Image (cartoon, rainbow, N blue to C red):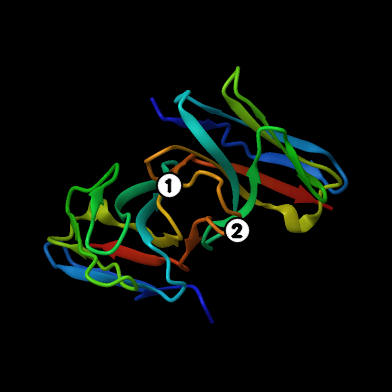
Amino acid sequence: NAGVTQTPKFQVLKTGQSMTLQCAQDMNHNSMYWYRQDPGMGLRLIYYSASEGTTDKGEVPNGYNVSRSTTEDFPLRLLSAAPSQTSVYFCASSLYWDQILTSGANVLTFGAGSRLTVL
Amino acid sequence: RKEVEQDPGPFNVPEGATVAFNCTYSNSASQSFFWYRQDCRKEPKLLMSVYSSGNEDGRFTAQLNRASQYISLLIRDSKLSDSATYLCVANQAGTALIFGKGTTLSVSS
């Protein structure tokens, strides 16, 4: 099934551990994004990649790292996990990063989410 | 100040009711707008785009008011299956999408 695949779906970490959340899309989208969602805070952008080889910080990038070496993959690395990083993480992709309505196909498609708990 | 603001609700309505949500955006340069729907513990999914002239999709109507910088979503004849959180989204050229915190709707029988 075409779409955005995130792994793992659930993860428990101890403070100070590092890990990588994987994200892959098979829709040949140029742009990919990582959001986190916390109760009462809504979706907040962590990092995004407008196209392969480029990445940019979003609203809450501290404590995370990303890379975009292929069109399909956009992994999110937690460098040293902290309890404040307990959250639901969503990866998303779109045809272009500029969401101006030039095409009905240019919408954001999300993965199913990764639930991370840091103890 | 959050760029996109919504009343979190919850809005509790009976089946068959009409309900409307508003969302305000602070950046007058915002050019495209959307409503996403998010079911409990699921990923957000696009409900509808919001066009300047307003648009309708079945029981759902979206409106944009640029002068007052708000968008609205009207749901007619509410169904139990409409229970969800509705996310307002805006962006300007050259930026990623900014999501509101969402408005929770609960439709009861």
What type is the residue that disc 2 sits on? Answer: Asp
Residue B38, position in %: x, y?
A: 58, 55
The extreme top residue here reads: B67
Left or right: residue A21 compared with residue B107: left
Front residue of this view, candidates B43 and B98: B98
Do the residues indicated by labels 2 and 1 lie within the same chain of the protein?
Answer: no
SS class, disc 2: loop
Asked if the residue at tag 1 contacts the one at tag 2, i.e. Cβ–Cβ closer than 8 Å, the answer is: no
Q: Examine the image and state in which quarter residue A19 appears.
A: bottom left
Residue B47, position in %: x, y?
A: 65, 52
Residue B6, position in %: x, y?
A: 55, 33
Identify which residue is drawn at 52% across, 77% down. Answer: A2
Left or right: residue B63 compared with residue A52: right
Tell me, for residue A98, which label it has, or none. Answer: 1
Q: Residues within 10 Å of mark 1 (few under 14, many from 20)?
A: many
Q: Examine the image and state in which quarter residue A25 appears.
A: bottom left
Q: Residues within 10 Å of mark 2 (few under 14, many from 20)?
A: some
Identify which residue is drawn at 29% across, 41% down. Answer: A59
What type is the residue that disc 1 sits on? Answer: Asp
For the residues labelled 2 and 1, the Cα–Cα distance comes to 26 Å
The extreme front residue here reads: A102
Label 2 sits on residue: B39
Give the mark toward the camera: 2 or 1.
1
Asked if residue B25 is positioned above or below residue A53 in the image, the reply reads above
Front residue of this view, candidates A61 and A57: A57
Position of the N terminus of chain A, as image quadrant, is: bottom right
Q: What subunit carries mark 1?
A: A
Position of the C terminus of chain A, as image quadrant, is: bottom left
Left or right: residue B71 compared with residue B101: right
Residue A17, position in %: x, y?
A: 13, 67
Identify which residue is drawn at 56% across, 39% down. Answer: B33
Asked if residue B77 is positioned above or below residue B73 in the image, the reply reads below
